[in-house]
Image: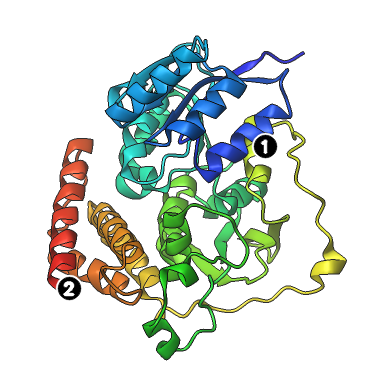
Amino acid sequence: MPKVQLVTILGATGTIGVNTLDVISQHPNRFKVYALTANKNVDALFNQCQQFNPSYAVMLDEQSAEQLSLKLKQAGSETEVLCGMTALEFVSSHEKVDAVMAAIVGSAGLRPAIAAAKAGKRILLANKETLVMAGSIFMEAVEEGGAMLLPIDSEHNAIFQVMPHDKSKSLISCGVKKILLTASGGPFRKASDEVLDRVTVKQALNHPNWVMGPKITIDSATLMNKGLEVIEAHWLFNASAEQIEVVVHPQSVIHSMVEFADGSVLAQLGNPDMRTPIAYALGYPERLQSGVSSLDLFKIARFDFEPPDTKKFPCLRLAFDALKAGGNAAAIMNAANEVAVEAFINEKISFKDIPVLIETVLENSQVVAATDLEMLIASDQEARVAAKLWVNCAV
């Protein structure tokens, strides 16, 4: 029988974290939760701790950590509560931990993911910002630490499944011509400019296919989510911008494809359920039961494809531009986007303001080589200040 794997879940109360726990619960003899982390959601993390009995629970917010600690003690739990970024790095790199689900949304997930990489863990990477902000630094940490990196985004997981696993540093040398990243197109794929002028937060949060957190859902509506995935694909698969193509596929059943030199195109298909890539990464190279229902091709009946409209959704173009610019450009873009999405959700700016804000911050920021993590974090913070200033002037 395989050894029981100890798993740390960063961002346990979010959509990915909840789905990870669901898969783990189906394989109690294979996996045990070592640590669970959250930002401020005390009640949800308390319930998870009661069910999975981790050694540690970590909260970024100090007051929330105190509340959770009190609740767990009153319930007779032996789970130890820690607080802060150092604690996140601790539970990500602990010698007992076998695998780390990196699912914290935003730049807060960067440091613990790097800590897991340096400690040589199996990293289930769902945090986009780790590669978008600090791709070169993170990939160096993965190589130096001897970590195993398994992507959780459905698109990158699909590419990983069909990509040759003995690939060299060059896609061309192993017969790969192009990566085809599929995109649902979001809720406004067919919307007119007039409709986009009046988009509400509620409308933008209504994704046609996927159930996700609010930030990722808004990113999907603007196509920035796909832009971030383009940058991720560059680092994960050593692909140039020219080797990555985005294909709008409204059904979200073909999760991505790889085109080969001989004309073959291999695709991974499945129902739009994050438990599939999570189970694949947890069990790799073995296939595990995920709880996902079988794909009914007769019910789907058809697949549609179309090119993305980068005039209507300029965030995708901005991401390609940032990838080509290199250095700290992607970190600047990502920071500006996080501020823009938060401002839109709080109804301080309009939906169409999101790409305008990002492009303005990019144009007024200095793009330089990405030398180290501290420099990238400084670029991130400077971009946030500039973006918040833009928002305040727009209000």
| Residue 258 shows in the view | no
Q: Is residue 250 left or right of residue 317?
A: right
List the residue tagged with mark 1.
Answer: 279
Res. 41 in view: yes
SS type, badge 1: helix
Query: Does residue 163 sit above or below 361 in this rendering?
Result: above
Q: Say how the picture is coloured.
A: rainbow
Horizontal relation, residue 287 to residue 97: left or right: right
On the image, numbered disc 2 is attached to which residue?
A: 394
Q: Position of residue 317 (x, y in %)?
A: 37, 72
Q: Relative to 238, is 249 above or below?
A: below
Residue depicted at 75% across the width and 46% down the height: 292
Three-letter amino acid code at disc 2?
Ala
> Residue 208 at what x, y percent from top left?
60, 68
Left or right? Give the position of 365 relative to 317.
left
Q: Give the image location of residue 274, x and y in percent.
A: 62, 47
SS for tag 2? helix
Which quarter of the rendered picture does the N terminus lie within? top right
Q: Amino acid at mark 1?
A: Ala
